[in-house]
Image (spheres, rainbow, N blue to C red):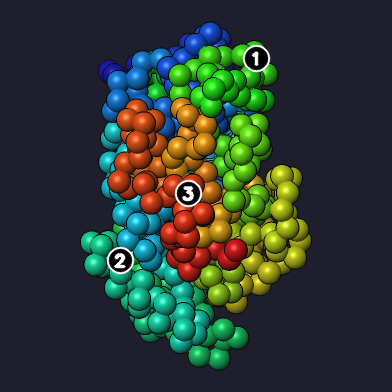
């Protein structure tokens, strides 16, 4: 009976263009004042607002997004999730995120399609293999699942991967994080948005922040395309545009904004059930649930804000993929795009206080912040609520670029910078 009723209601909804479906989140007008404003409606900003409401009892929070939620890098990335970083500071933070991913669909009551299908990082030289062994050992010391696999094991595990010794850059082995994988990026934004909205967070789209109200060294609010809004605390979570917003606040960040490209092929039947990355040949690949091969490149070397990239980067990444999987040379590309990534000098993020009191920044995730979405929101919410960094994000402060306490993760970033 209920099955027939659902089929009927599905048909009736379809005939009414889904007009009766409840909105997943409201479309509120901005209030005059919020206890906390989060600038940027990507996954990190929405997660920050969600955890502020959920974990810290904030009931007067807004997320201001200049376009549409998830329209930045959150909706443009290649969805790889892993926590196999080299240094303890980074490993622990990404592992916190991994643990949140493992319960995220249940937490948000929304299927984010988190699929722990394993992530391989290939090694093509003796030095690559030494680095892999060191990183795997370090991961294990930090309680993170990691293994070194041989070229022979790779050949068995990944059909189609060219493990021949006569390849131009022969594959000598890889690291494997079995708990790594992929998630559906749009669903992550939508899931956090819906859950945050249900806790009273105002999500305001088409609202660009164009400046800050700063008095006596303290932030008092933001200027926006929808008017001025007062706030006790403001968190800026705008990825590739962080330097622009820092400029509005009167300080500089050690970031460069580069295009990062990705591509998808026409859909294929299932051919690849894991994620394969090669920093040495500058390409990585997985297969989406729709069947498309999802391929990514290293960053385009120039800086800029145009969300498109150069042809030579496309060619370079596709050469790498065809070298790894010769059979894919016959597959046609469907589309390509780019996002603007905020690359820091040590390939690690900046999360915390700024020279302006009450103003927090979360940026510098560069090519690798999707995997950190829940963890980053969780630590930033803690930092805002307590006016103090959590021990997990304390090392990722802005001062490290003056003190020299850098956390160099270029090797584990796994995407060429
Ligand atoms: P965004 O999703 O970019 O959100 C920032 C938001 O701020 C945007 O929606 C933007 O419109 C808004 N905004 C900007 N300026 C203003 C303003 N003035 N006022 C209001 N709003 C503003 N990471 C991984 O871990 N795994 C991957 O596989 C991976 N692949 C990638 C592939 C590509 C092609 C790209 C581009 C990135 C990839 N990344 C990956 C990186 C990852 O996408 C980002 O680090 C992460 O999504 C950043 O999330 P965010 O919420 O901080 O940023
Ligand atoms: O950080 O794992 C990563 C990643 C994969 C693709 C782009 N970034």
The residue lying at 47 percent from left, 60 percent from top is 404
Quadrant where the image shows the C terminus: bottom right
Q: What element carries label 1?
A: loop
Answer above or below: position of 123 versus 184: below
* C-beta proximity under 8 Å, tags 1 and 2: no
First-in-chain label (1 vs 2): 2
**Which disc number belongs to residue 226?**
1
| In the foreground, 96 or 1 | 96
Q: Name the residue under label 2.
A: 139
| N-term-proximal mark, 2 vs 3 | 2
**Left/right of residue 356 with respect to residue 155 in the rendered view:** right
Picture coordinates of residue 339 (x, y %)? Answer: 63, 47
Front tag of 2 and 3? 3
Between the C-alphas of marks 2 and 3, the distance is 26 Å
Quadrant position of ligand 1 = top right
Please tell me how crowded label 3 is: few (under 14), some (14-19), or many (20+) other residues with Cα within 10 Å. some
Q: Residue 15, position in %: x, y?
A: 55, 15
Q: Considering only vertical position in the picture, is 22 above or below 171?
A: above
Identify the residue at horizontal 46%, vertical 87% (top origin).
126
Q: Position of residue 124 (x, y in %)?
A: 50, 81
Q: Disc 1 and disc 2: Cα gap in Å? A: 47 Å
Q: Can you see residue 236?
A: yes
């Amino acid at each position: 009976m209920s099955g027939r009723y659902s089929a009927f209601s599905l048909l009736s909804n379809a005939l009414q263009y889904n007009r009766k479906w409840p909105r997943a989140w409201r479309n509120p007008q901005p209030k005059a004042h919020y206890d906390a404003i989060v600038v940027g409606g990507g996954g990190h900003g929405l997660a920050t607002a969600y955890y502020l409401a959920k974990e810290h009892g904030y009931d007067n929070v807004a997320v201001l997004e200049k376009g549409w939620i998830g329209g930045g890098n959150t909706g443009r990335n290649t969805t790889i999730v892993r926590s196999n970083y080299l240094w303890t500071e980074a490993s622990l933070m990404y592992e916190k995120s991994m643990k949140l991913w493992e319960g995220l669909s249940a937490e948000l009551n929304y299927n984010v399609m988190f699929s722990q299908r394993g992530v391989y990082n290939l090694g093509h030289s003796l030095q690559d293999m030494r680095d892999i062994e060191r990183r795997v050992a370090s991961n294990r010391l930090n309680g993170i699942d990691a293994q070194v696999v041989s070229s022979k094991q790779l050949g068995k595990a990944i059909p189609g991967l060219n493990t021949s010794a006569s390849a131009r850059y022969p594959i000598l082995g890889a690291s494997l994080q079995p708990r790594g994988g992929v998630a559906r990026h749009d669903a992550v934004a939508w899931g956090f948005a819906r859950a945050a909205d249900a806790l009273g967070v105002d999500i305001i789209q088409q609202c660009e922040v164009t400046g800050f109200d700063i008095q006596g060294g303290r932030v008092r609010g933001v200027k926006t395309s929808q008017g001025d809004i007062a706030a006790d605390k403001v968190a800026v979570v705008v990825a590739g545009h962080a330097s622009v917003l820092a400029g509005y606040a009167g300080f500089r960040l050690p970031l460069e904004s580069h295009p990062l490209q990705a591509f998808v092929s026409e859909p294929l039947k299932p051919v690849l059930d894991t994620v394969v990355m090669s920093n040495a040949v500058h390409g990585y690949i997985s297969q989406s649930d729709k069947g498309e091969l999802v391929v990514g490149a290293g960053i385009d070397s120039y800086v800029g804000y145009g969300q498109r990239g150069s042809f030579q980067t496309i060619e370079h990444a596709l050469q790498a993929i065809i070298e790894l999987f010769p059979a894919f040379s016959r597959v046609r590309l469907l589309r390509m795009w780019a996002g603007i990534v905020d690359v820091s000098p040590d390939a690690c993020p900046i999360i915390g206080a700024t020279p302006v009191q009450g103003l927090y920044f979360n940026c510098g995730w560069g090519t690798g912040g999707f995997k950190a979405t829940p963890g980053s929101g969780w630590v930033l919410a803690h930092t805002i609520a307590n006016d103090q960094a959590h021990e997990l994000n304390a090392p990722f402060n802005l001062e490290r670029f003056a003190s020299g306490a850098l956390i160099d993760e270029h090797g584990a970033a796994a995407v060429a910078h």
